[in-house]
Image (spheres, rainbow, N blue to C red):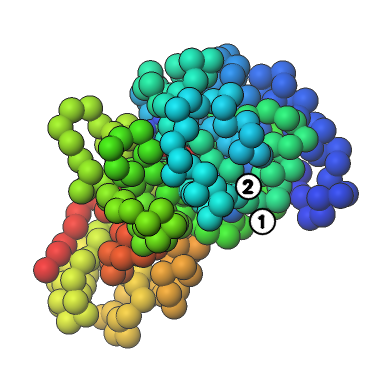
Amino acid sequence: MNTKIIQIKDLKEASLAFEEAGELLKKGELVAFPTETVYGLGAFALDGQALKKIYLAKGRPADNPLIVHIADFDQIETLARDIPPQAFRLRDYFWPGPLTLVFKKNPRVPDIVTGGLDTVAVRIPAHPVAQELLRRSGLPLAAPSANLSGRPSPTTAEHVWEDLQGKIPLILDAGQTQVGLESTVLDLTRDRPIILRPGGVTQKDLQSALGEEVLTYQEGVVSGPALSPGMKYRHYTPGAEVILLEGDVSFCKESIYKIIQKKRKQGKKVVVLGHRVGDVFGEKYISLGKNPSEIAYNIFAYFRELDQKGYDTLLIEGVEDAGIGSAIMNRLRKSASEIVSS
Ligand code: TXA
Ligand code: MG
C-alpha cells in the first residue's frame, strides 16, 4: 500500500484533503492525523473491521483498548451510558483538550474498541485538524497513538511515516504536536475519580475543577484486573537502552560518571539528556528543555532522533514528579530498562 502524506497549512485550503480522509474512513480505512498531544491513528469507531486494522498496523495487543475521539459533547451518549455529573464540569474546564474520560460503555460500541472491558474512553481533541476531520467526516474516531506498539508516540508526521509507511493509506501532516505527551486518562466509573495515565491535565487541575479528591493511579490501585490495560506494557522505547536517574543533583552527577565509565568500557555510544547538569564528563549532552512543558514537547522526538544517530545508551535525568512532571516521569519509567535512584 502506498502511504500518502498531505500537508495541511490552512484549513480552508485543505478541503480536498479532508474529503479524501473522510472517504477513506467511511470505507473502513485508517487515517493518521495530528492532535494537540501526539498523532493518532484513526478508524471509524463503530466499524469492527476497520478497528482490526488498527491493531494489525500497530502490532498492538488485543486487550489494550482505544480512545474514541469526538467533535461534540452531544455525541457522547452514542458511546457511553450513566454519564456522571463530573463529566459536565470537566467538559467545561478541559474540553476540547488533552483529557480522556472513561465511562460505562454504550452496548453499541464494539468490544474490539474497549478490549472487552465494559467501559469506554472518550476525548474531544483541541487540534484544529483533528476537529475538522471529526466534524467533516461526522464519525467518532477510535485513535491510539500512531506508532508501532512499544515505540515512542509520534509527535510529527515523519515519525508516523517511520513506523507505518506502507501499512496505512494517508497521513495528515500539520507539523509537530504542541503537548508532546499523550492525554491524561481519568476513570469516572468508580467511587472516586482515578487518574489511569498522567498527562497534560494534572491532578491539581482536575481537583480544582471538580472540588473533590482525585486519586493517582498508585493511590487508586485495587487488587484484581489492571484498571487500564495499557499501563502494564513496557512502552515508549527507542532502540537504545534508557537509563533513568532519579535523585538530587549531586547524586545524579556521581551516578552519571559511574555509568559513563562502565558503558565506555563496554564500547557503548552514550548520550546524556537532562536539564540541570553542566559537566557531563566528556559525553554528548542534550538539554531537554528549560521547563517541564518544553521537556514534554521534546522528549519523544529526541528518543527517535538519537536512535537514528546510533546511540546505544540514553542516560536521562528525571524531573520532579509533580504537575506535568508526573506525566514525563511516567513515560520515562516505562521506557527505562534501568532506574538508578537515590
Ligand atoms: O493523547 C492521546 O490520548 C492520544 C491521542 C491520539 O489522542 N492517544 C493515545 O492513545 O495515547 P493510546 O491508545 O496510545 O493510549 C490509550 C490509553 C491506553 O493506556 C489504554 O489502556 C487506555 O488509554 N484506555 C483506553 N480505553 C480504556 C478504558 N476503557 N479503560 C481504561 N483505560 C483505557
Ligand atoms: Mg500509545
On the image, the x and y values in percent for residue 313 come to 30, 59
Amino acid type, label 1:
Gly
User: How many residues crowd mark 1 within 10 Å: few (<14), some (14–19), many (20+)?
Assistant: some
Spot occupied by residue 30 in the image (x, y as percentages of width and height): 63, 28
- For image coordinates 53% across by 53% down, the residue present is 94
Residue sitting at 44 percent across and 36 percent down? 84
Q: How many numbered discs, if any?
A: 2
Determine whether the residue tagged by mark 2 lies in a helix, strand or loop.
strand
Numbered circle sitting on residue 175: 1
Q: Are marks 2 and 1 in contact (CB under 8 Å)?
A: yes
Residue, far bottom: 278
Q: Is residue 139 above or below residue 84?
A: above
- Which residue is pictured at 51% across the width and 36% down the height? 122
Between discs 2 and 1, the one toward the N terminus: 2
Q: Position of residue 280 (x, y in %)?
A: 29, 79
Q: Mark 2 sits on what residue?
A: 34
Q: Secondary structure at mark 1?
A: loop
Looking at the rendering, the quadrant in which ligand 1 lies is: top left
Horizontal side, residue 326 vs residue 35: left or right: left
In the depicted structure, whether residue 177 falls above or below residue 222: below
User: Looking at the rendering, which quadrant does residue 137 occupy?
Assistant: top right
Q: Label 2 is placed on what type of residue?
A: Pro
Whether residue 308 can be seen here: no
